[in-house]
Image (cartoon, coloured by chain):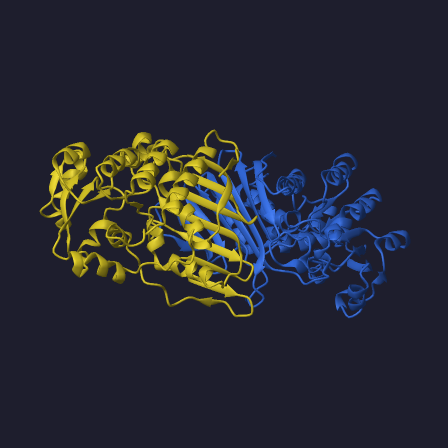
Chain colours: A yellow, B blue
Amino acid sequence: MNITRRAFTLASAAAVSSGAAAQDKPVRLAMLGTVGHPGEILGALPRAPRVRLTAVSEDQPAIRARLSRNRAMEGARIYASAEELLAKEEFDIAAVCNDNGARAGVSLACLRRGIPVIAEKPLALTLGDLASLRAEVEQRGRKLTSLLKMRTDPWFLAIRRCVERGELGEVVQVSAQKSYKAMGAGDWRTQAESFGGTLPWIGIDLIDLMRWTSGREFTEVATLQNRIGFEAIGPVDNSVASLFRLDNGGMATLRIDYLRTPGAPTHGDDRLRVAGTEGIAEYTAATGVTLQRRGQAPVQVKELPEERSLFLEFLAHVEGGPAPIAYPDLFRSVEIALKAWESGKGGGLKPVRL
Amino acid sequence: MNITRRAFTLASAAAVSSGAAAQDKPVRLAMLGTVGHPGEILGALPRAPRVRLTAVSEDQPAIRARLSRNRAMEGARIYASAEELLAKEEFDIAAVCNDNGARAGVSLACLRRGIPVIAEKPLALTLGDLASLRAEVEQRGRKLTSLLKMRTDPWFLAIRRCVERGELGEVVQVSAQKSYKAMGAGDWRTQAESFGGTLPWIGIDLIDLMRWTSGREFTEVATLQNRIGFEAIGPVDNSVASLFRLDNGGMATLRIDYLRTPGAPTHGDDRLRVAGTEGIAEYTAATGVTLQRRGQAPVQVKELPEERSLFLEFLAHVEGGPAPIAYPDLFRSVEIALKAWESGKGGGLKPVRL
């Protein structure tokens, strides 16, 4: 990971995407699938005036029926499958927002046509599919990124900035949590084929976030994962915990649950804590971002970095700017998530080298 | 663990220890060592009017020099070693507050004389010493407990009460944290022989707390532990994380660090989170005890149970009451802490069955 690279801000990315040199050329965007976080794309469109959403596919009829009421999709042609869209449309950029199981296949089809892809996370559910995507990027120069949206959040950007400035010294211990409300029966995330697993679906966010904020690499993992109660969510693990060894002998813990109660004020309860030899930076909803530094009184960090937009930064990347997520880093986070998931299958503790 | 046994309250324990039946017989207390948490004993003496602190030993001259200024020790004979005290004194109860390395030996010497022992934690640094202590209790009926003082804290008593009342359903995920300020150079806790390790010294508090509040048993563990930076603290691991498998397929994470900065408002930042199929109970300093229950809005728990005193409850146990910490449970927590510590030696992830 290049911990010193300055994050592209919304403003600079938007400037590039609407730059004078190519201002007159519209950029045709196709959205293949509309589940997960399509809002990351649709919400950024007003700030990307050259981009036109020209085509959308959605294979679930119930979801497709709602698309016509979405004003952000006005004027886009709607298809019942990604295959049909790919056969009939020409476009310049693909947003791949289909289910986890179908994602790698559609992303590959786009990349092989030479079309840059911004995809939901995880990029793939198998190491083989991940290798195929990587080959397109590394051997054929295709452009790809993934909606690891925790990287765009001011809370976590602030913690990364503490590490970059050296305010925590050498990072020794990292920990992160996601606690979510369980999905309803019938949701695409309750079917094994379309969902995959809890660790690749939301665990990758935390794995990537812990690596990216700390600047440390993970070298070994053991995971425990299970579903207890909640028969309606089928094969979804409602509790996951992983222990990672860091490259400097430190350690990271990840915990995920789908046990947040329906009456809780938000869908999720995300947390991050990064502890080093000179200080500790942490985010929780109750405290905001706090920073303890040796020789100083603990403080709440009130000046937060500007929120990023992976979509706008990806547009700038397509036009020659840096990748919003450095490629080795992007593929590595997916690889670790898939290996951490694998290590948790079977019930007992089975450490895996990373 | 007997999750339904009602905790003895301070009031009821004090009543037994000063009960009419034995009111005229003084109880001679010897304190062997004065490090760790002797305040748990000394602070309770005003509520145990029959108990007289008659003898104290402390083998560190610098600490011994300060004892004469401690009003709670007024009238007690002071010895420079536990051996000398044991050779010269007759007493009825022993408080063993010496260093971790010497603890099991002195505790055994007392138990073999038929004297009940309330000892600091951990009871032993090896499984062999633990087995010797256990044999005294189980084969010879000796009485023993340990200062696992997190069990006495109203915050954690409140969380245990949530589990006992069924408010969380089946517990699926447990996690606990201790973050401490590092000790100074020269402290007894910076010498391997007297300290042992971070996991047996403070990890046992969290292991016992997680088992005791959740009512679940641990069946497997992997630990990572290390010291990074902080040369002055010698062999002390300043970062530890363990992943435990629960008997129902759930999981627990423990994290400990000695990275809390000197300017932080308290020495420690203790936390506990217990998540189940019907709700989540949690303590942090920032939030107090919070409780989410299915079908209800989340609340802060304001009515907390009364604080307990392990010393007063142990006095009542000596006079025929129940043990303050049930024996199988007490020995099991020490066993798990020692095995979790062992599993972390060598650097890599080495799962151990519990």
Which residue is found at the position 36% from the left and 53% from the top? Answer: A151
The residue located at (34%, 48%) in the rendering is: A148
Q: Say left or right for B180 vs A83.
A: right
* Residue under the point 12% across and 39% down: A78
- Residue A269 position, x and y percent, is 38, 51
Name the image quarter holding residue A76.
top left
Quick check: B186 above or below A80? Answer: below
**Residue B294 makes an appearance in the image:** no
Residue B70 position by quadrant: bottom right
Q: Position of residue B336 (x, y in %)?
A: 63, 40
Image position of B156 with respect to A87: above or below: below
What count of labels does the image hold?
0
> In front here: B241 or B154?
B241
Q: In front here: A128 or B276?
A: A128
x, y percent for residue B290: 44, 54
Relative placement, left or right, of B138 versus A3 is right
- Front position in the image: A223 or A14: A14
Q: Can residue B146 be seen?
A: yes
Please tell me which residue is depicted at 78% across the width and 68% down the height of the picture: B66
Q: Is residue A141 left or right of residue B212?
A: left
